[in-house]
Image (spheres, grey):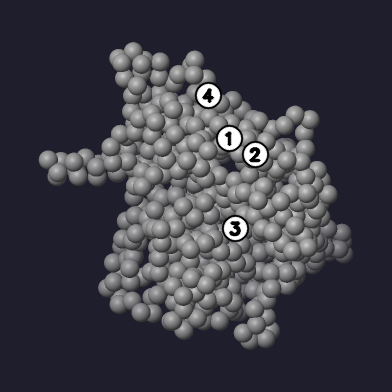
Amino acid sequence: MTAGIQKQTAHERRKGESALSEFADYVEKQQAKGRGKSVAAAPSDSGYSTQSTQYEDHAELDILDSLDLADTSTHAKLKELLLDASEGAEVTLPQLGNVLAKRMLEGHGETLFDLGQEDNGESLGFSKEQWDIALDRVRRAANINQAECRVLMTRNVGGEEEVGSPNEKDKSCTGKVMIRQAPETPEDVIETRIAVVGNVDAGKSTMLGVLVKGGLDDGRGKARVNLFRHKHEVESGRTSSVGMEIMGFDTKGEIIASNVPGRKLSWEEIGKRSAKVISFTDLAGHERYLRTTVFGLLSSSPNYCLLMVAANNGLIGMSKEHLGIALALNVPVMVVITKIDICPPQILQQTITQLTRILKSPGARKIPIFIKNREETIETATQFISQRICPVFQVSNVTGESLDLVRTFLNILPHHGNYDAEAPFEFHVNDTFSVPFVGTVVSGVVKSGVIHAGDAVLIGPDSLGQFTTTNIRSIERKRIPVPVCSAGQSASFALKRVRRKEVRKGMVVLPKLDHPPRVYREFIAEVLILSHATTIKTKYQAMLHVGPISQTCAIIDIDRAFIRTGDRATVAFRFVQRPEYLSVGDRILFREGRTKGLGIVKELGYNKDKPLNPDLGKDGSS
């Protein structure tokens, strides 16, 4: 009997896992549709058939618009712009500058330029002399746009960046050049947010300490001490809170670090000298702090997720849980295997085999790429926009092995995320502070729109669902005062006339409107149950996470009698404590013990007169 139950439970778990990646993709498409203001089709009642004629967006055909297929094309050939040595060469230089400016705009201030290749990947057949001319032209064109160039790798050119040609017959000179614009103001700095997750003792805080501070670890926790926020964290060596660290790169891709050994730069110094900033959210690995970790993952809106795995332990405990949450949120994942200096080769091989199996499983559907050299680092970073690939690094924080590859990867990591600066302003609070001589400060991520210092805003909802009118006294990004903040950026706002006890995590800041914003205690969502030991019925309660909101919710209606692992269903939820501000299309994650589920908000409010399952009460069941 027991064996039968275990077999059934394992089968249902696999069923839930295999549906995870598919459902995460579905949620992503629904959110994209919401951004496009199109009408979402009614979700299917069961199974996984989500196909509808309304979802057929042939994005792959958009490329036809950019190919310039008109008969009377005035488009100057890229090769001509790169090799123009005529008397009018100075005239065509601004044209090349415009090409680079357009690409940098698309890349949020940076671009990776394939010098020696056409846009479609065909070789331009450059000789060494032509390559030198073209590189000089690109550098001068970049200077027009206040940008710097850095050659990342070359083929058939020679020098430090040479990686060799994969095809012996191809003798043409090609290479990849990083072009990055110098930010005019601190608010123009490129920002990439990375959530760092993994099991306890995987080396998360140590890895960040080494990456950010520059020195190496001594194997006894030297590198992680500066990252801890609480005394008990220093004593136990375990993170229990959401830590924040930043790492800056200048326009040439060099790490912003102190010239004095052992001196740590302040956030202000890093922010003012950087053209690109990587914000790391250091999350707790212990099971006891799972709620804190889930809150950190959802509230920080990470662009990428960095999963740390100890070589001598493998993917154990909470690391699988963290990987599952990252997959559910459709955040691109990269893996770093740490402690390779103390791990026997056969144990390391077991860890690699296990990691490969999990990443290739139906639930994850990732293609692991084990990065061993500079060429693989650069090629993988440029293709990392693809959700399917998963780069894997093997590093030692004591010997420093492969850490330079991780730094190179982070430097050229492309900006990822969809943010709408044209939409109405919306800011989610994920932390609150009381700062002497400043007052109440809230920090979080701007979900959409633009805000200026001095603007009148509303913050709420409180326990009664009310919003408070206030003004933004000042705005800071990475502890640097800025006059304006826009969608996709993390920031802190100092608020006027608001006490700290009146604000909490999970609140939203909205522009002041004629009508107060609507808040909801009840909502309807389409959910996927990832794991549950038995069946879920109405009156079931679980901890629900929506962005920075964490609150207990009760299920008040389901579109069928019960749901179990692997099922997709439409469910009505009710917040137990207080109403919250929600939007259609928000991702939700709920958990209680071993139970996990994810979903997407489909409808705000709930009408008792229109139950999701009208037949439920007819057989006498509740």
Q: Which of marks 4 and 3 is nearer the N terminus?
A: 3
Say above or below: 428 vs 205.
above
- Residue 517 image position (x, y, % from top left): 69, 32
Q: What element carries label 3?
A: strand
Residue beneath the point at 41% across and 37% down: 541
Q: What residue type is labelled 2?
A: Pro
Residue 461: which disc?
2
Q: Which of marks 1 and 3 is nearer the N terminus?
A: 3
Residue beneath the point at 64% across and 40% down: 462
Inspect this view and state whether residue 181 appears. Answer: no
Q: Which of 414 and 608 is in front in this view?
A: 608
- Residue 405 image position (x, y, % from top left): 52, 72
Q: Nearer the viewer, residue 347 or 575?
A: 575
Q: Which of marks 2 and 1 is nearer the N terminus?
A: 2
Q: Which residue lies furthest to the bottom in this view?
A: 261
- Residue 113 image position (x, y, % from top left): 66, 60
Alpha carbons under labels 2 and 1: distance apart: 7 Å
Contact (Cβ within 8 Å) of mark 1 with mark 4: no
Residue where numbered disc 4 is placed: 606
Alpha carbons under labels 2 and 3: distance apart: 27 Å
Residue where numbered disc 1 is placed: 579
Residue beneath the point at 75% across and 29% down: 515
Residue where numbered disc 3 is placed: 193
Alpha carbons under labels 1 and 4: distance apart: 13 Å
Q: Which of marks 1 and 4 is nearer the N terminus?
A: 1
Is residue 144 left or right of 341 when viewed as pictured? Answer: right
Disc 3 crowd rating (10 Å Cα; few below 14, some 14-19, many 20+) is: many
Q: Which amino acid does label 1 sit on?
A: Pro
Q: Which amino acid does label 4 sit on?
A: Tyr
Say above or below: 118 vs 229.
above
Residue 387: which disc?
none
